[in-house]
Image: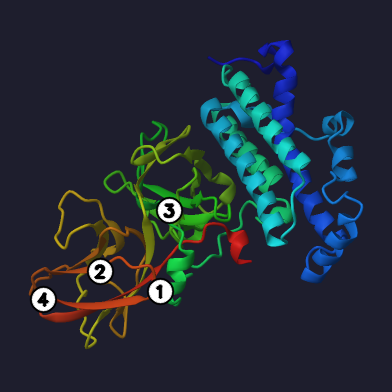
Amino acid sequence: MQMDRGSIPSEKKYLVDALRRHREILRWETILLRSEITSRNLATITGKKAYLKRHDADGDGRSISPQLVEHMSLHKIKEIKPVSLPYLVDNHEEALDLLLHEAHKLAYRIQSLSKEFSATIPLEKLRLFHLLSQECLSISETIATHGSPISSESSEDAEISLFKERRNGWESTWGSPVLRCGSFNDITTLSPMYSTHSAPRVIESSRYITKALQIYSFKIFDLNENLKWPLDVYGVVAARDAVDFNRNLLFSCSRANCQVVTEKDPFLHLTGPSRAIVADEPVDFEVELKIKFGTDQSQDIALISATNHYTSRGDAAFFSGRSCSATLRLETVPRAAQATILSIRVVGGVSLFEFGGRVACSFSTEEYVDPTSEQVVLVESAEKIPEDDGYLTLSRKVVTAGLQGGLQVAIQAYGGSDRPSVSGLLYFPSQYCRVSRRTCLVGGFEVEVTVAWSWFVQDKMEIL
């Protein structure tokens, strides 16, 4: 049931205001902590020793900062610009989960700062975080009983407006230079081969065991009756995980190179992720797609603008818009590693894929083909697949594999008028690091596949 924000009981309004300011308080604390470390010269070992020696004598080494006391005053808190209520409770269950998740990560960043500079967080500050967390839980339970505020906007405008609210909410939390997440549109720069060239003993001592997502496909369906297939689609589909909170592009297509999506083939041609998506915490998916009409961009219309706060429940993330619906097929892989398909080469320079073909991979615990398992398509075409000295041009390269098993690579070369279809299969046991290279015969021709293995980064802050 939808409710106007004015229908929230008056005695609970102070709780709503507190939640809308909660994240900003944590951002202040992060800034102040870094400021104190710098001003007290705690960034060096010499500075730390001098500080401890200076303050152990008078016993005030653990006193709470005067700046924090000032900023935590009721007067100062009331001056904080609140996050707009529609952003919080448009979908109250997911939005509240998101807020709690963001508050937790901000507190984690503060602890990371203290670890980075070996600075002790005073007991008063730890108690403050505990109280804020308890209050946030109470606030969440209150707001969860209320629905979305009534909107007078059209459904199309409201859809775009909600996405803008999402952008504003992200920028108000993670856009600060202190948190080092950059701008809303920034793309992740972390490599999928972070630990590829590390010694195994180093990986064993610092490895990060976690679950990660395998992305399979993105399908557009339930098209508005006012639209007709085919569609010239362009835009972005992206994921954000807790590693760096930047966009990890699954699909990115410019207006000049838009994809023709048909009723018979309503799937986007995915090109990502550029690194595996860590799923130990909820992952945010963002969809911004438009339809190209003619030569004038002003005539283009929004196909769908939507988000999904995915909590590793189920094998799909759903998106609903005014013009269509969409589903992202995926899988959560426990105890995972990330694999990068560095190259697929036809040895001898033979044009094996002259009539097209398909190369796909899947995770398996055995060295046999499971016909029911979903596959990640690396490249597929009914026409000749481009090659450079025998090397295939791949659409996707990064996949997720469980450590208790391995990666199957299925290669199929389509046949023509004078050549039958041929296929081959390779199996790579999962690894923490290093590079694997294996070959198989496809129609009598040798095909070589090279895979790089890597562990995960838990947080970008740890490697800066």
Point out which mark residue 210 bears.
Answer: 3
Q: Residue at x 53, y 45 (%)?
A: 300
Residue 152 in the image, given as x and y percentages of width and height: 63, 21
The span from disc 2 to disc 1 (Cα, nearest Å) is: 17 Å
State the mark number for residue 428. Answer: 2
Give the mark toward the camera: 2 or 1.
1
Q: Nearer the viewer, mark 1 or mark 4?
A: 1
Q: Residue at x 31, y 86 (%)?
A: 389
Residue 12 visible in the current orientation: yes
> Mark 2: which amino acid?
Phe
**Amino acid type of the residue tagged 4 in the rendering:** Gly
The nearer-to-camera label among 3 and 4 is 3
| Label 1 sits on residue | 200
* Earlier residue among tags 4 and 2: 2
> Which residue occupies 22% across, 88% down?
348
Where residue 445 sits: x, y (%)?
A: 14, 81
| Tally of numbered discs | 4
Give the residue type at disc 1. Pro
Q: Earlier in the sequence, mark 1 or mark 4?
A: 1
Real-space CA distance between mark 3 and mark 2, rounded to the nearest whole angstrom: 20 Å
Looking at the image, residue 51 lies above or below residue 334: below
Q: Which residue is mark 4?
A: 443
In whole angstroms, how far apart are the C-alphas of marks 3 and 4? 39 Å
**What kind of element bears circle 2?**
strand
